[in-house]
Image (cartoon, rainbow, N blue to C red):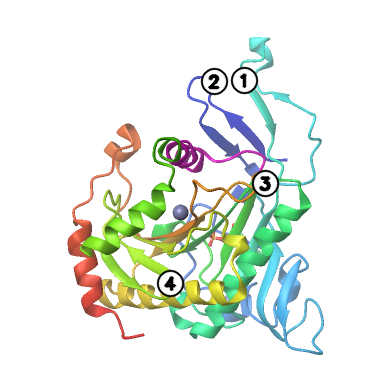
Amino acid sequence: MPELRRDPVTGQSVVIAESRSQRPGAFEAVHDDLAVEDCPFCEGSEHLTPGEVAALRYDGTEVDAPGWQVRVVPNKYPATSLGGDASSHVDASSSAGSDWFVAEPAIGSHEVIIESPRHIRSVSELGVAELADAFRMYAGRLAHHRRSGRARYAMVFKNVGSGAGASMPHTHSQLITLPSVPAPVARELRGSLEFYANNGRCVYCELIDRERGDCARVVAESKWYVAICPFASRFPYEVWLLPRNHASSYETSTSCQSGAAASLTHRVLRGVERLLGRPDYNYVIHTAPFDTETLDHYHWRLELIPRLSKIAGFELGAGVYINPVAPETAARQLREVLEPE
Ligand code: AMP
Ligand code: ZN
Ligand code: ZN
C-alpha cells in the first residue's frame, strides 16, 4: 500500500510507492522504441491493462475490447490505492518510539486516460474533435471522483517524453486522487482568498482582464478561453489556459466548453511544437478541491509546460526557477507561429 508521508518540519507531502519501481523501465528513459505489439495502450492490447473503468466506445463494442476512442484504466503500478485500511497509521520509525514519523495510507485512485487507440506520442497528432473527447473524459472522471466522496482532491496531468517524466510513449494522461489538497493548489487557494477578501473579486478574473488589456503575454484567445504566458513563468514557453468567465472547477465545464478548451490547447500545443521542434511537455489541470462548492475566489486553469531544460540545483534548493526566456518574448514568438483558428 503506498504511503503518504509528511515532512515533520515543513509538512511537505511525499508518496512512497515502492510498487512503482516494478514498472517496466521504472528508472530508464521512455521506451520510444516500444513496439506497437508490446504497447499495453494500443487498440487490440486491452488485455495488457487492468479492466477499463470508463471508455468512449463505438456502439455495439464490448468492454475491454477494441472499438474505443478514449479508454480509462486503473494504473497497474498505482501511486495511490483504495485497498488500504484508512485508519491505520504506520510508524515508520518504531525505534523513535514516538509519533514523529507518521505515514498514512495514500488512499486514492490512480487512473490512466488513454486518449487514442493509435500509437501516437502527442495529443497534437489527434484531430481537435478527438482531443475534445479526451477533455470531456477528464471532466467526466473528475466529476465521478467528486461524486464518490472518497477524495478531497484530484489532479489530471500529462507527461510526454522522458524529459517530462513519461515512461510510456503512447499518448495518455493520468488522474490521481488524494486525501488532501496538494501544497501548490493550497497556496493558490490561500492567495486568491486573501485577494477576494480585500477586493471582492477573483484574482484570476482580474489577471485575465489585465493581461487581455495589455496583450504582451497573451498567446491566443477564443470565445471561452484565453492562453497566456504567465508574468512569473517558471519555464520557457510556459502557457496557462484559463476560462474567460469565472469557473472554479474544471468538471463543471459543459461539453461545449470542454471541447473549446481542447481546441485552444490543441492550437497552442501545435504552435509550441512548431516553434520548439516537438519538445517533451507536461500539462496539468489546477482545479478546486472536491469538498468545496463553487468558489468565487478560485479559478481553474490548465498549465502547459514544455520541458526544454531539467530542473537543476538552484530550483531544487531554493525553489526559485531561473527562466532564460521572458514570457513576453515567448508569447510573441508563439503568436507568430500559431495557425489561424
Ligand atoms: P508515464 O510514466 O507518465 O508515461 O505514465 C504511464 C503510466 O502507465 C505509469 O504510471 C505506469 O505505472 C502505467 N502503466 C504502465 N503499464 C501499464 C499497464 N499495462 N496498464 C496500466 N497502467 C500501466
Ligand atoms: Zn501504443
Ligand atoms: Zn475568476
> According to the image, label 1 marks what residue?
101
Whichever of callouts 1 and 3 sits on the residue coming sooner in the sequence is: 3
In front: 40, or 258? 258
Please state the horizontal and vertical placement of residue 147, each as a whole percent of the image.
75, 54
Whichever of callouts 1 and 4 sits on the residue coming sooner in the sequence is: 1
Please state the horizontal and vertical placement of residue 225, each as a whole percent of the image.
42, 69
How many C-alpha atoms fall within 10 Å of the one at disc 2: few (<14), some, or many (≥20)?
few
In this view of the protein, can residue 79 be seen by the observer? no
Q: Nearer the viewer, mark 4 or mark 3?
A: 4
Cβ atoms at labels 1 and 2 below 8 Å apart: yes
In this view of the protein, can residue 339 be seen by the observer? yes
How many C-alpha atoms fall within 10 Å of the one at disc 1: few (<14), some, or many (≥20)?
some
Which quadrant does the N terminus fall into?
A: top right
Which quadrant does the C terminus fall into?
A: bottom left
Instruction: Indicate the secondary structure of the residue bearing disc 1.
Output: loop
Instruction: Report the Cα–Cα distance between label 1 and label 4.
Output: 42 Å
Which amino acid lies under the numbered mark 3 shown in the image of this protein?
Answer: Thr
Q: Is residue 248 left or right of residue 78?
A: left
Which amino acid lies under the numbered mark 4 shown in the image of this protein?
Answer: Thr
Q: Which residue is at a point 72% across and 86% down the rendered structure image?
A: 67
> According to the image, label 2 marks what residue?
8
What is the span of residues highlighted in magenta in the rendered image? 178-193
Cβ atoms at labels 1 and 4 below 8 Å apart: no
> According to the image, label 3 marks what residue?
80
Cβ atoms at labels 4 and 3 below 8 Å apart: no
> According to the image, label 4 marks what residue?
265
Whichever of callouts 4 and 3 sits on the residue coming sooner in the sequence is: 3
